[in-house]
Amino acid sequence: MGRPPCCDKEGVKKGPWTPEEDIVLVSYVQEHGPGNWRAVPARTGLLRCSKSCRLRWTNYLRPGIRRGSFSDHEERLIVHLQALLGNRWAAIASYLPDRTDNDIKNFWNTHLKKKLLAQHHRATAAGLSSSSTPAPAPSQAALMAKGHPASSSAGSAAYALTARNISMMLSGWAPPGKGATAGNGNPATPGAADSASTGTSSELTDCSAASSASNSKPVLGPSSSPPPSMLACESEATATAGVPPLSAIESWLLLDDSGELPLALEEQLLDVALRNYAF
DNA sequence: AAAAGCGGCAACCGCTTTCTA
DNA sequence: GTAGAAAGCGGTTGCCGCTTT
């Protein structure tokens, strides 16, 4: 018994928001706070569905959103997080609090994808790309987390590795006796996606359960002091699979704009990002 | 100067997850 | 335990402005 789409009602307006609508929505949220979106259209008189209101608020009207071009540091951060997390834009966005997941997704699809591809081609032509050698398996976190574009939303959603999970791993929890299992090495395969609710997610649950400290998005950034340890969940796998140790990635993520990623690590991450997206 | 093509971005759609009665 | 509602998320679409021909 499916429920009717919330935006199918007659009289529901679609398309671009007008400044007047924005003002109404902002006024309402300022007064009542975000949430209970279902009530927003009725209470404000906006001829929009609740979903549209929420989206407009979170992606455009919410205070603290930075718009405009991405800095070089943000750009590299996104590339590396994408390599780790796959197309899990909400999780990636949690590392860039002033950017929305939609913004990051658009930026990736319109800029970074092409840029990476061009970079990859240049590297390949120069014989520098690591893909010219047998491709190492992506890191375990990347394997678990990446939502491959070929997989369905159901599949990608099954990778229950949220920013919180990453945070937990960053905080240094090591699964007892559980090295990073290589899995089938390809979560993008339908079977892998389907099984995520069993094997993969249970591993993630273990990670989650073992960490008691983290309960919100990780505090990462130039001002943060580095977590004391590395990404234990995948240390073993990365050590054997030829993927850069995550502690190095982690360290880089914590660098400020002046930080430099070692060339070899940069190339390997680029390779992971490229394979994640199946260029 | 006009038309066609292209790229960027806001918004929508459909699905999953979470919450609640 | 179950069903329905609400919220969250990622993929996709379509409009609009800019660039190229």
Image: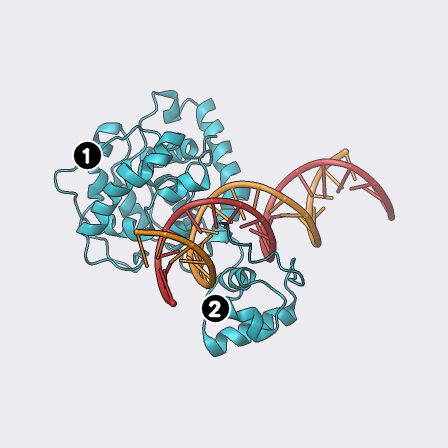
Chain colours: A cyan, B red, C orange
The percent position of residue A45, horizontal first and vertical second, equals 61, 73
Which residue is at 35% across, 42% downward? A159
In the rendering, which numbered label is found on residue A196? none
Which residue type carries mark 2?
Pro
Chain where mark 1 sits: A
The percent position of residue A244, horizontal first and vertical second, equals 28, 35
Q: Which of the 4 image quadrants contains residue B4?
A: top right
Label 1 with label 2: CB-CB less than 8 Å = no
Decide if residue A226 is on the left or right side of residue A11.
left
Q: Is residue A197 above or below residue A134?
A: below
Which residue is at 33% across, 50% downward? A162
Which residue is at 59% across, 69% downward? A22
Q: Tell if the residue under mark 1 belongs to the same chain as the one under mark 2.
A: yes
Decide if residue A147 is on the left or right side of residue A184.
right
| Residue closer to the observer: A106 or A261 | A106
Helix, strand or loop under label 1: helix
| Residue closer to the observer: A168 or A203 | A203
Q: Is residue A262 above or below residue C15?
A: above
Helix, strand or loop under label 2: loop
In the rendering, which numbered label is found on residue A63? 2
Q: Count the numbered circles shown.
A: 2
In the rendering, which numbered label is found on residue A236? 1
The percent position of residue A258, horizontal first and vertical second, equals 35, 50
Residue A216 can be seen, yes or no: yes
Work out how far the residue at label 1 is from the one at label 2, CA to CA, in angstroms. Answer: 42 Å
Which residue type carries mark 1?
Glu
Residue A141 can be seen, yes or no: no
Decide if residue A207 is on the left or right side of residue C21.
left
